[in-house]
Image (cartoon, grey):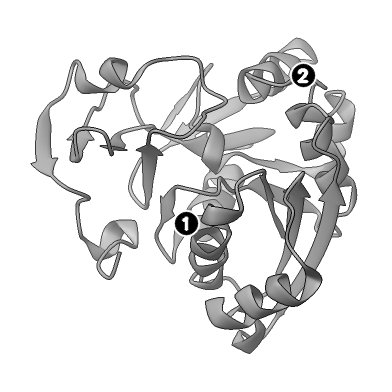
Amino acid sequence: MSAVIVTHRNEFLAHALAQIAGFEYPYLQVVVGLHGVDIADGEIERLIRASGLGAVEGREVVVHRIGRDVPFGRAMQEACDRADGVLITKVDDDDHYAPEHVWDLVLARMYSGAQLVGKALDWIHVQADDVTAFRPVYPAESYATFVAGGTMLISKADLLAAGGWRPVPKSIDRALIEQVKRIGGLVYRTHGLGYVYVRHGAEHTAVVSDEHFLTQNARQWPGLIAHEAFGTVQA
């Protein structure tokens, strides 16, 4: 299993590494794609040590530098090309993940038989308003045409069969779903627990506005919801 993260924001690198360090999975290769990030090798090593990744048994960290002018989709593909795992899961640099997150995806792949699995986008922390919204718009445990991009899991072979990540700057998650469907593959959306999608003032590759996530809500909480189910108790 390989967890792949591509980031162009060094301010989120420590957070992302800490999230991955918390994953409860027996062996996990971590591929960190630095997309135009101007950071010294020594500082990267320090962040890896500080995250606790180096102290977790069965963890291998691969750091790959990617030019800033490379489109995000191509950068993601470059990072995935360096993954040794049979399965690859995409991790976003600013979101929150529970320790059981990877297991949730692996089990969903096993019982669904789908080529691409991911979680429902139910829980969103909108930083501009400092609220966590519960927005269960997409039915869980169902074959689907949408999953949360920061939770995608696919085998390396299926990724290759689908043509890989589209070499474009935005909407690469949607493009991969379309490509998997085009070759006759299945996409499955499991539950949304264990994942909080974060919207903040920095640049997003998603094209929708913050206001979109504050509609059709079942409930809202002030601040970032703190619960073990989301890995946010100490966030």
Q: Residues within 10 Å of mark 2 (few under 14, many from 20)?
A: some
Callouts 1 and 2 close, C-beta under 8 Å:
no
Asked whether residue 158 is in view, the answer is no
Task: Indicate which disc residue 223 carries.
Answer: none
- Which quadrant of the rendered structure holds the C terminus? bottom left
Left or right of 43, for residue 209: left
Nearer to us: label 1 or label 2 = 2
Q: What's the residue at 51%, 21% (across, down)?
A: 146
Task: Indicate which disc residue 101 carries.
Answer: 1
- Which quadrant of the rendered structure holds the N terminus? bottom right
Q: Position of residue 169 (x, y in %)?
A: 72, 21
Q: What's the residue at 39%, 60% (across, down)?
A: 98
Secondary structure of the residue carrying tag 2 is: loop
Left or right of 1, for residue 211: left
Question: 124 or 104, which is in the foreground?
Answer: 124
Residue 227 in which image quadrant = bottom left
Amino acid type, residue under disc 1 in the picture? His
Q: Position of residue 219 (x, y in %)?
A: 10, 32
Question: 191 or 204, which is in the foreground?
Answer: 204
Amino acid type, residue under disc 2 in the picture? Val
Of the two numbered discs 1 and 2 on the same chain, state the one appearing first in sequence.
Answer: 1
Q: What's the residue at 52%, 54% (across, down)?
A: 12
Q: Residues within 10 Å of mark 1 (few under 14, many from 20)?
A: many
Q: Position of residue 161 (x, y in %)?
A: 88, 28
- Image height check: is 96 above or below 124? below
Tell me the distance, in whole angstroms, between the alpha carbons under discs 1 and 2. 28 Å
Q: Position of residue 221 (x, y in %)?
A: 10, 42
Q: Where does label 2 land, which residue? A: 168
Secondary structure of the residue carrying tag 1 is: helix
Q: How many marks?
A: 2
Q: What's the residue at 57%, 25% (across, down)?
A: 205
